[in-house]
Amino acid sequence: MDLAKQLKQKNISADLIILNNVLAHVPEINDFVGALKVVLKKEGTITVEFPHLLELIKNNQFDTIYHEHYFYFSLKTLQKIFKRHKLSIYNVEQFDTHGGSLRIYATHEGNSLDISSHKKSVEKIIKVEINHGINTINFYSQLGNNADRLKLNALKYLVAKKILNKSIVAFGAAAKGNTFLNYCGMSEMVVIFIFVNLKTKEIRWYAKTKFW
């Protein structure tokens, strides 16, 4: 917020502020969103792209959860946060990125963009969220059971292949992969090596790579 105020004092403001997969990494969320409002021009737009919490829970994407993320957003929750700072979400788009993402478009309450006809897209997705029970505890409680079931099925499959003397390798070393390996408790006895860079064919032996 301090930086935003300094920019405002220097008459520096933005027509467009783009935040792609950034907001989940911000611990002081209200201070951050408040700063966005300070530096946004009267008819300016903020775009925010983020993994959709509805898809995370519904499709058992527990591997998306790791320490560098502070928040996982539903559209309904993000709308409340922006409204607290007199910002209005006037449009939303859906993407397949990260197992299902949303990109919202927000502006100052009461300006010409705020009365956009695209607001129906916001109402539509919030209605879908509520119909799935996104504002109830039961909706979230299913994640643990579903993750356990996936873990057991994965281990059952991999151990069966090892018993048959099959070699198991992995491609890429993304954070999601690390989360999955840790949760399943896999060691070099199961996964013998991981291709880290498919372009250079770099191979990193699992036994020398710490995932725990």
Image (cartoon, rainbow, N blue to C red):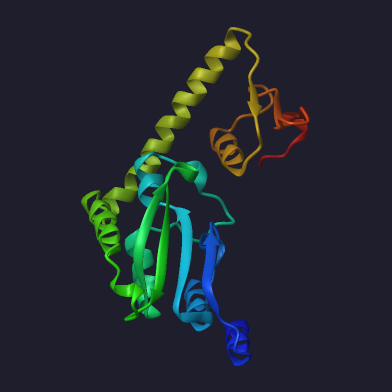
Q: Position of residue 134 (x, y in %)?
A: 29, 54
| 150 sits left or right of 191 in the view | left
Q: Is residue 62 above or below residue 17?
A: above
**Mark count:** 0
Q: Is residue 199 above or below residue 71?
A: above
Image quarter of the C terminus: top right
x 34%, y 50%: residue? 140
Which residue is situated farthest in the bottom direction here? 9
Question: Observer-nearest residue: 105 or 70?
Answer: 105
x 51%, y 46%: residue? 64
Question: Observer-nearest residue: 193 or 49?
Answer: 49
Q: Position of residue 41 (x, y in %)?
A: 49, 81
Q: Position of residue 193 (x, y in %)?
A: 71, 25
Q: Quadrant of residue 146?
A: top left
Image quarter of the N terminus: bottom right
Q: Quadrant of residue 119?
A: bottom left
Q: Is residue 134 above or below residue 91?
A: above
Which residue is situated farthest in the top direction here? 164
x 63%, y 90%: residue? 10
x 49%, y 44%: residue? 98
Q: Position of residue 6 (x, y in %)?
A: 63, 88
